[in-house]
Image (tube, rainbow, N blue to C red):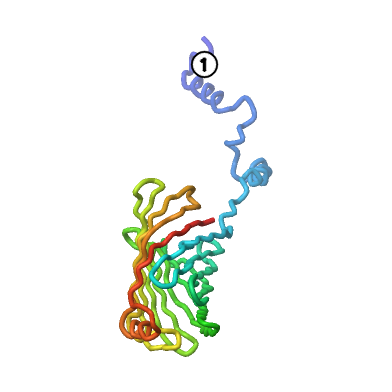
Amino acid sequence: MTALESCPWLSVFVLASCAGTPSGPAPTDQLEPNSSRIESAAPQGQRAWPRPVHDDQWFSFVRAEQLEYRSQPGADLLRWEAQGWYGGDYTRLWLKTEGELSVDGPSDGEIEVQALLSRLIAPFWDVQVGARYDRRWASGTGAGRWFGVVGLQGLSPYEFEVEPALFVSEDGDLSARLTATTDFLITQRLILQPRFETEIAFSSVPEFGVGEGVNYTDLGLRLRYEVRREVAPYIGINWIRWLGKTGRLVRSAGNKRNELAIVFGLRFWF
Protein backbone atom coordinates (compact mmCIF):
# COMPACT_ATOMS: atom_id res chain seq x y z
CA MET A 1 0.00 0.00 0.00
CA THR A 2 1.41 3.35 -0.94
CA ALA A 3 1.50 6.44 1.19
CA LEU A 4 -1.20 8.13 -0.89
CA GLU A 5 -3.50 5.14 -0.50
CA SER A 6 -2.96 5.03 3.25
CA CYS A 7 -3.54 8.79 3.62
CA PRO A 8 -6.43 9.98 1.47
CA TRP A 9 -6.12 13.55 2.73
CA LEU A 10 -2.55 13.64 1.41
CA SER A 11 -3.70 12.81 -2.13
CA VAL A 12 -6.23 15.60 -2.03
CA PHE A 13 -3.51 18.04 -0.96
CA VAL A 14 -1.16 16.96 -3.77
CA LEU A 15 -3.85 17.28 -6.47
CA ALA A 16 -4.85 20.72 -5.24
CA SER A 17 -1.23 21.85 -5.26
CA CYS A 18 -0.75 20.64 -8.85
CA ALA A 19 -3.92 22.33 -10.06
CA GLY A 20 -2.98 25.68 -8.50
CA THR A 21 0.49 25.78 -10.04
CA PRO A 22 0.47 26.99 -13.67
CA SER A 23 2.76 25.13 -16.00
CA GLY A 24 3.54 28.16 -18.19
CA PRO A 25 3.96 31.91 -17.79
CA ALA A 26 1.05 33.76 -16.25
CA PRO A 27 -1.27 35.50 -18.76
CA THR A 28 -0.93 39.23 -18.91
CA ASP A 29 -4.51 39.80 -17.77
CA GLN A 30 -3.69 38.13 -14.45
CA LEU A 31 -0.72 40.35 -13.63
CA GLU A 32 -0.78 42.54 -10.57
CA PRO A 33 -1.78 46.17 -11.15
CA ASN A 34 1.77 47.36 -10.41
CA SER A 35 3.30 44.94 -12.88
CA SER A 36 5.98 46.32 -15.13
CA ARG A 37 4.22 44.74 -18.10
CA ILE A 38 1.10 46.86 -17.51
CA GLU A 39 3.22 49.99 -17.15
CA SER A 40 5.11 49.31 -20.36
CA ALA A 41 1.87 48.58 -22.25
CA ALA A 42 0.04 51.72 -21.07
CA PRO A 43 1.68 54.22 -23.46
CA GLN A 44 1.12 51.86 -26.35
CA GLY A 45 -2.55 51.50 -25.41
CA GLN A 46 -2.92 55.27 -25.24
CA ARG A 47 -1.49 55.66 -28.72
CA ALA A 48 -4.14 53.24 -29.97
CA TRP A 49 -7.01 55.66 -29.16
CA PRO A 50 -8.56 57.32 -32.27
CA ARG A 51 -7.84 60.94 -32.96
CA PRO A 52 -10.31 63.45 -31.48
CA VAL A 53 -13.21 64.59 -33.66
CA HIS A 54 -13.10 68.26 -34.68
CA ASP A 55 -16.74 69.08 -33.92
CA ASP A 56 -16.29 72.82 -33.36
CA GLN A 57 -15.95 73.85 -36.99
CA TRP A 58 -17.32 77.02 -38.58
CA PHE A 59 -19.66 77.00 -41.56
CA SER A 60 -21.52 79.50 -43.77
CA PHE A 61 -25.04 79.71 -45.18
CA VAL A 62 -26.78 82.17 -47.54
CA ARG A 63 -30.47 82.21 -48.48
CA ALA A 64 -32.35 84.61 -50.76
CA GLU A 65 -35.91 84.33 -49.52
CA GLN A 66 -37.23 86.84 -52.06
CA LEU A 67 -35.71 87.87 -55.36
CA GLU A 68 -38.78 88.94 -57.26
CA TYR A 69 -40.57 91.20 -59.70
CA ARG A 70 -43.78 92.76 -58.40
CA SER A 71 -46.41 93.72 -60.97
CA GLN A 72 -48.86 96.17 -59.43
CA PRO A 73 -50.90 99.27 -60.27
CA GLY A 74 -48.60 102.22 -60.61
CA ALA A 75 -44.87 101.52 -60.62
CA ASP A 76 -43.68 97.93 -60.76
CA LEU A 77 -40.96 96.97 -58.30
CA LEU A 78 -37.89 94.81 -58.01
CA ARG A 79 -37.84 93.38 -54.48
CA TRP A 80 -35.23 91.37 -52.59
CA GLU A 81 -34.82 89.88 -49.13
CA ALA A 82 -31.78 87.78 -48.21
CA GLN A 83 -29.79 86.72 -45.18
CA GLY A 84 -26.73 84.66 -44.37
CA TRP A 85 -24.50 83.67 -41.49
CA TYR A 86 -20.99 82.49 -40.72
CA GLY A 87 -20.06 80.71 -37.51
CA GLY A 88 -20.49 77.59 -35.43
CA ASP A 89 -23.29 75.86 -33.58
CA TYR A 90 -23.57 78.47 -30.83
CA THR A 91 -22.16 81.80 -32.08
CA ARG A 92 -22.75 83.26 -35.55
CA LEU A 93 -22.33 86.50 -37.47
CA TRP A 94 -25.48 87.34 -39.47
CA LEU A 95 -25.92 89.68 -42.42
CA LYS A 96 -29.45 90.57 -43.56
CA THR A 97 -30.61 92.83 -46.35
CA GLU A 98 -33.91 93.77 -47.95
CA GLY A 99 -35.15 96.50 -50.21
CA GLU A 100 -36.97 97.49 -53.36
CA LEU A 101 -36.39 99.52 -56.49
CA SER A 102 -39.04 101.01 -58.77
CA VAL A 103 -38.90 99.86 -62.38
CA ASP A 104 -41.14 102.48 -64.01
CA GLY A 105 -40.76 106.21 -63.66
CA PRO A 106 -38.24 107.83 -61.29
CA SER A 107 -35.57 105.65 -59.75
CA ASP A 108 -37.08 105.50 -56.27
CA GLY A 109 -36.12 102.86 -53.75
CA GLU A 110 -34.99 101.87 -50.31
CA ILE A 111 -32.50 99.44 -48.81
CA GLU A 112 -31.97 98.02 -45.34
CA VAL A 113 -28.83 96.20 -44.11
CA GLN A 114 -28.32 94.53 -40.73
CA ALA A 115 -25.13 93.13 -39.17
CA LEU A 116 -25.88 90.97 -36.13
CA LEU A 117 -24.03 88.75 -33.69
CA SER A 118 -26.15 85.81 -32.51
CA ARG A 119 -25.92 83.31 -29.68
CA LEU A 120 -27.89 80.08 -29.30
CA ILE A 121 -29.99 80.32 -26.11
CA ALA A 122 -32.36 77.35 -26.62
CA PRO A 123 -32.94 74.63 -29.21
CA PHE A 124 -33.87 76.37 -32.49
CA TRP A 125 -33.65 79.88 -30.96
CA ASP A 126 -30.95 82.57 -31.31
CA VAL A 127 -30.75 85.97 -29.67
CA GLN A 128 -29.31 88.61 -32.01
CA VAL A 129 -27.68 91.95 -31.26
CA GLY A 130 -26.20 94.39 -33.74
CA ALA A 131 -26.75 97.38 -36.04
CA ARG A 132 -29.07 98.30 -38.90
CA TYR A 133 -28.76 100.94 -41.60
CA ASP A 134 -31.65 102.28 -43.73
CA ARG A 135 -31.35 104.32 -46.90
CA ARG A 136 -34.22 105.82 -48.91
CA TRP A 137 -33.99 107.84 -52.09
CA ALA A 138 -36.46 109.52 -54.45
CA SER A 139 -36.08 112.03 -57.31
CA GLY A 140 -32.39 112.58 -56.68
CA THR A 141 -32.68 113.09 -52.92
CA GLY A 142 -32.03 110.59 -50.18
CA ALA A 143 -31.70 110.10 -46.45
CA GLY A 144 -30.33 107.43 -44.17
CA ARG A 145 -30.25 106.54 -40.49
CA TRP A 146 -28.75 103.98 -38.10
CA PHE A 147 -30.41 101.70 -35.58
CA GLY A 148 -29.38 99.44 -32.75
CA VAL A 149 -31.01 96.00 -32.96
CA VAL A 150 -32.03 93.38 -30.40
CA GLY A 151 -34.04 90.43 -31.63
CA LEU A 152 -34.79 86.74 -31.71
CA GLN A 153 -34.85 84.28 -34.57
CA GLY A 154 -36.08 80.72 -34.40
CA LEU A 155 -38.64 78.04 -35.05
CA SER A 156 -41.83 78.33 -33.00
CA PRO A 157 -44.37 75.55 -32.38
CA TYR A 158 -46.24 74.45 -35.53
CA GLU A 159 -43.02 75.13 -37.51
CA PHE A 160 -43.33 78.89 -37.98
CA GLU A 161 -40.05 80.68 -38.65
CA VAL A 162 -40.35 83.78 -36.47
CA GLU A 163 -38.20 86.94 -36.33
CA PRO A 164 -39.27 89.50 -33.72
CA ALA A 165 -36.90 92.47 -33.41
CA LEU A 166 -36.66 95.76 -31.52
CA PHE A 167 -34.97 98.81 -33.10
CA VAL A 168 -33.67 102.06 -31.57
CA SER A 169 -32.62 104.75 -34.06
CA GLU A 170 -29.73 107.16 -33.64
CA ASP A 171 -32.31 109.79 -32.64
CA GLY A 172 -33.88 107.54 -30.00
CA ASP A 173 -36.93 106.50 -32.06
CA LEU A 174 -38.18 103.09 -30.94
CA SER A 175 -39.87 100.57 -33.24
CA ALA A 176 -40.54 96.84 -33.41
CA ARG A 177 -41.10 94.34 -36.22
CA LEU A 178 -42.48 90.82 -36.43
CA THR A 179 -42.04 88.47 -39.40
CA ALA A 180 -43.41 84.93 -39.60
CA THR A 181 -43.38 82.33 -42.39
CA THR A 182 -44.20 78.64 -42.72
CA ASP A 183 -44.20 75.99 -45.45
CA PHE A 184 -46.99 73.66 -46.55
CA LEU A 185 -45.79 70.75 -48.68
CA ILE A 186 -48.26 70.01 -51.48
CA THR A 187 -45.77 67.54 -52.95
CA GLN A 188 -42.10 66.92 -52.20
CA ARG A 189 -41.19 69.74 -54.60
CA LEU A 190 -44.29 71.96 -54.75
CA ILE A 191 -44.47 74.12 -51.62
CA LEU A 192 -46.90 76.85 -50.56
CA GLN A 193 -45.49 79.53 -48.25
CA PRO A 194 -47.68 82.10 -46.45
CA ARG A 195 -45.87 85.10 -44.98
CA PHE A 196 -46.88 87.76 -42.45
CA GLU A 197 -45.09 90.95 -41.40
CA THR A 198 -46.05 93.97 -39.33
CA GLU A 199 -44.25 96.88 -37.72
CA ILE A 200 -45.10 99.30 -34.94
CA ALA A 201 -43.44 102.66 -34.22
CA PHE A 202 -43.52 104.44 -30.87
CA SER A 203 -42.85 107.86 -32.39
CA SER A 204 -43.41 109.57 -35.74
CA VAL A 205 -40.61 110.20 -38.23
CA PRO A 206 -42.33 111.96 -41.20
CA GLU A 207 -39.15 112.31 -43.28
CA PHE A 208 -39.04 108.52 -43.52
CA GLY A 209 -42.79 108.09 -43.95
CA VAL A 210 -43.23 106.57 -40.47
CA GLY A 211 -46.13 107.48 -38.21
CA GLU A 212 -46.70 106.58 -34.59
CA GLY A 213 -48.62 103.34 -34.06
CA VAL A 214 -48.96 100.23 -36.21
CA ASN A 215 -47.39 101.10 -39.58
CA TYR A 216 -48.56 98.35 -41.91
CA THR A 217 -49.70 94.78 -42.39
CA ASP A 218 -47.92 92.80 -45.10
CA LEU A 219 -49.38 89.45 -46.26
CA GLY A 220 -47.91 87.21 -48.94
CA LEU A 221 -48.64 83.83 -50.46
CA ARG A 222 -46.02 82.21 -52.70
CA LEU A 223 -46.08 78.87 -54.50
CA ARG A 224 -42.63 77.57 -55.38
CA TYR A 225 -41.33 74.55 -57.25
CA GLU A 226 -37.97 73.22 -56.13
CA VAL A 227 -36.11 72.30 -59.30
CA ARG A 228 -33.37 71.41 -56.85
CA ARG A 229 -33.57 71.85 -53.10
CA GLU A 230 -31.32 74.87 -53.49
CA VAL A 231 -33.18 76.53 -56.39
CA ALA A 232 -36.91 77.22 -56.55
CA PRO A 233 -38.77 79.62 -58.88
CA TYR A 234 -42.11 80.84 -57.53
CA ILE A 235 -45.26 82.78 -58.27
CA GLY A 236 -47.63 84.43 -55.82
CA ILE A 237 -49.47 87.47 -54.56
CA ASN A 238 -48.55 90.10 -52.00
CA TRP A 239 -50.85 92.56 -50.26
CA ILE A 240 -49.81 95.45 -48.04
CA ARG A 241 -52.02 97.86 -46.10
CA TRP A 242 -50.60 101.06 -44.62
CA LEU A 243 -52.28 101.86 -41.31
CA GLY A 244 -52.92 104.78 -38.97
CA LYS A 245 -50.68 107.82 -39.17
CA THR A 246 -48.34 106.04 -41.57
CA GLY A 247 -51.27 105.50 -43.93
CA ARG A 248 -52.06 109.20 -43.85
CA LEU A 249 -48.42 110.02 -44.68
CA VAL A 250 -48.50 107.58 -47.59
CA ARG A 251 -51.72 109.12 -48.91
CA SER A 252 -50.38 112.68 -48.57
CA ALA A 253 -47.38 111.62 -50.70
CA GLY A 254 -49.81 110.67 -53.49
CA ASN A 255 -49.73 106.91 -53.01
CA LYS A 256 -52.46 104.41 -52.19
CA ARG A 257 -52.86 102.88 -48.75
CA ASN A 258 -53.41 99.42 -50.30
CA GLU A 259 -51.04 97.65 -52.68
CA LEU A 260 -51.86 94.30 -54.28
CA ALA A 261 -49.15 92.80 -56.46
CA ILE A 262 -48.57 89.65 -58.47
CA VAL A 263 -45.04 88.43 -57.86
CA PHE A 264 -42.63 86.31 -59.90
CA GLY A 265 -39.36 85.34 -58.32
CA LEU A 266 -36.59 82.96 -57.42
CA ARG A 267 -35.68 81.52 -54.03
CA PHE A 268 -32.25 79.95 -53.58
CA TRP A 269 -29.74 79.00 -50.90
CA PHE A 270 -26.19 77.71 -50.69
Residue position for label 1: 4
Where residue 104 appears, as percent x and y from the top left, is 48, 71
Residue 86 appears in which quarter of the rendering? Answer: bottom right
Residue 183 appears in which quarter of the rendering? Answer: bottom left
Q: Is residue 42 above or below residue 202?
A: above
Where residue 245 appears, as percent x and y from the top left, is 33, 85
Relative depth, front residue between 93 and 111: 111
Q: Quadrant of the C terminus?
A: bottom right
Q: Amino acid at mark 1?
A: Leu
Of helix, strand and loop, which one carries label 1? helix
Q: State whether residue 99 appears in this view.
A: no
Where residue 200 appears, as percent x and y from the top left, is 35, 80
Q: State whether residue 90 appears in this view.
A: yes
**Residue for point 53% across, 66% down:** 92
Relative depth, front residue between 91 and 241: 241
Where residue 223 appears, as percent x and y from the top left, is 38, 55
Task: Give the mark count.
Answer: 1
Q: Is residue 173 above or below residue 111?
A: below
**Residue for point 33% across, 80% down:** 214
